[in-house]
Image (spheres, rainbow, N blue to C red):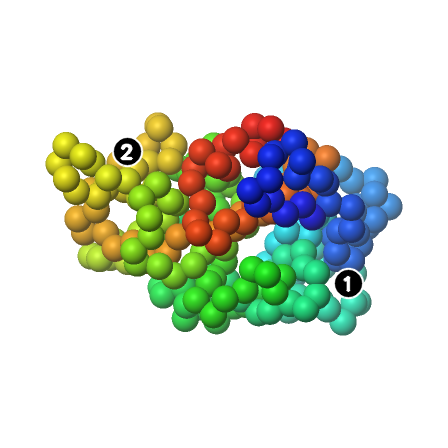
């Protein structure tokens, strides 16, 4: 897996060469049965890119493991992820809370989530949690099936990608925290220009984005990490250079 920090994109887009054993087993099983990634994705009722993430080792939720077993996939390794998705790690690893999919219409406190995922020690902090991105509201910076790591922070810097929770119903959205100089107030800027901005009134910023993992066309994965928070333009630049 490639870890991206502040280095030039041309220097750090190195492809993953050591996929986890589960991803390798999935690929071998699929090829032995002469199935394409699209064939398996259709059977699982998901996108091809989402399934390709599993072969790359990005995330395998437990219900997908049950579906894969129903298709004939057998996984006997002692690290079979019962009750949690898995993320490619270099040991030692830590257990991080997995808060499900975002954006979400009804969302509980992510730091109280009862599902966990193994993450590399470099990503772990006690006030961090992880999610999968769904929908197109954050495109092109964040895309469906992206695996994201968030740090609890109610006062991040302007320009960062944040999770905001609506006070009236607990709905969660992903936006860019921005400042309106004309009005002299903060607001939540839509990452996808096709979507609407939101007033900060009625919403509470609860976390900022610090890491993203996504699949590349060749089946490898790229990991982009910024402990001080991530801006949409940083992700767009890296993805366009890949």
- Residue 114 image label: none
Q: Residue at point 30% right, 58% down? A: 154
Residue nearest the viewer, comparing 21 with 62: 21
Numbered tag placed on residue 75 in the rendering: 1
**Rendered residue at 14%/39% (across/down):** 184
> On the picture, is 51 further left or further right than 185?
right
- Mark 2, residues whose alpha carbon is within 10 Å: few (<14), some, or many (≥20)? few
Q: Position of residue 68 (x, y in %)?
A: 69, 55
Occupied quadrant, residue 7: top right
Q: CA distance from mark 1 to mark 2?
A: 44 Å
User: Residue 188, image x and y in percent?
Assistant: 27, 42
Q: Which residue is mark 2?
A: 196
Which residue of the protein is positioned furthest toward the front in this rendering? 7
In percent of width and height, residue 11 lies at 67, 36
Residue found 33% across the figure and 48% down from its top: 157
Question: Is 37 located above or below residue 121 in the figure?
Answer: above
Q: Is residue 25 left or right of residue 127?
A: right
Q: Earlier in the sequence, mark 1 or mark 2?
A: 1
Q: Is residue 67 visible?
A: no
Locate residue 233 relative to residue 10 in the image: left or right. left
In this view, 109 is above or below 12: below
At 50% from the left edge and 66% from the top edge, which residue is drawn? 125
Does residue 18 show up?
yes
Check disc 1: other Cα within 10 Å, few if <14, some if 14-19, many if 20+.
some
Tag 1's secondary structure?
Answer: loop
Q: Residue furthest left?
A: 183
Label 2 SS: loop
The answer to whether marks 1 and 2 mark residues whose Cβ atoms lie closer than 8 Å is no
Q: Quadrant of residue 95?
A: bottom right
Q: Which quarter of the rendering shows the C terminus?
A: top right
């Amino acid at each position: 897996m490639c870890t991206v920090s502040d280095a030039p994109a041309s220097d750090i887009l190195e492809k993953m060469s050591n996929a986890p054993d589960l991803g390798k087993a999935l690929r071998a099983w699929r090829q032995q049965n002469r199935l394409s990634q699209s064939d398996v994705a259709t059977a699982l009722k998901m996108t091809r890119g989402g399934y390709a993430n599993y072969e790359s080792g990005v995330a395998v939720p437990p219900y997908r493991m049950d579906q894969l077993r129903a298709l004939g996939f057998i996984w006997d390794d002692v690290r079979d992820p019962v009750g949690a998705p898995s993320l490619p790690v270099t040991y030692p690893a830590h257990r991080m809370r997995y808060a499900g999919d975002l954006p979400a219409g009804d969302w509980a406190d992510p730091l109280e989530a009862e599902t966990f995922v193994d993450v590399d020690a470099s990503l772990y902090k006690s006030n961090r949690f992880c999610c999968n991105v769904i929908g197109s509201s954050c495109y092109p910076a964040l895309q469906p099936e992206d695996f994201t790591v968030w740090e609890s922070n109610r006062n991040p810097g302007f320009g960062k990608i944040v999770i905001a929770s609506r006070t009236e119903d607990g709905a969660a959205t992903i936006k860019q925290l921005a400042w309106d100089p004309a009005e002299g107030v903060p607001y939540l800027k839509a990452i996808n220009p096709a979507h609407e901005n939101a007033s900060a009134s009625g919403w509470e910023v609860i976390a900022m984005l610090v890491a993203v993992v996504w699949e590349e066309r060749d089946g490898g994965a790229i990991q982009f990490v910024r402990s001080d928070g991530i801006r949409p333009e940083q992700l767009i630049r890296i993805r366009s250079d890949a």
